[in-house]
């Protein structure tokens, strides 16, 4: 079972915030362009360590990597 096309609510919520908050999106995009999705997700997770979305979803490497999928184009 999926949640709005994502693995679960956490994945959807993290993707929603990364792809709709302009400063977070620009930062994520710059990391993907510089390091690729895998390393970029790790670097973003390190910078957001311990933080959650305003809705309470934790920023993890796996949820961030899923949200960054497709940014490499």
Image: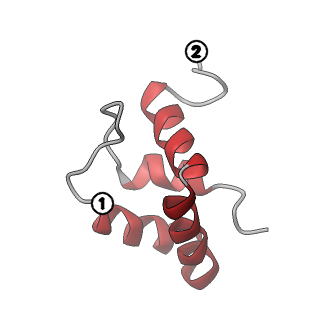
The residue at the far top in this view is 1
Mark 2, secondary structure of its residue:
loop
Residue topped by disc 1: 48
Q: Is residue 68 above or below residue 55?
A: below
| Residue depicted at x 55% and y 81% | 35
Residue 39: % across, % down: 47, 74
| Residue depicted at x 46% and y 64% | 41
Residue topped by disc 2: 1
Does residue 64 appear left or right of residue 59 in this picture?
Answer: right
Does residue 48 appear left or right of residue 13 in this picture?
Answer: left
The residue at the far bottom in this view is 34
Does residue 71 appear left or right of residue 12 in this picture?
Answer: right
Counting residues from the start of the chain, the first of labels 1 and 2 encountered is: 2
The residue at the far right in this view is 73
Residue 47: % across, % down: 30, 68
**In front: label 1 or label 2:** 1
- Label 1 neighbour load within 10 Å: few <14, some 14-19, many 20+: some
Mark 1, secondary structure of its residue:
loop
Quarter of the figure with residue 44: bottom left
- In this rendered view, identify the residue nearer to me: 66 or 12: 12
């Amino acid at each position: 079972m999926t949640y709005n096309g994502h693995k679960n609510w956490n994945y959807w919520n993290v993707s929603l915030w990364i792809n709709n908050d302009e400063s977070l999106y620009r930062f994520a995009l710059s990391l993907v362009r510089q390091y690729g999705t895998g390393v970029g997700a790790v670097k973003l997770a390190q910078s957001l360590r311990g933080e959650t979305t305003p809705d309470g979803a934790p920023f993890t490497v796996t949820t961030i990597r899923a949200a960054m999928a497709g940014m490499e184009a």
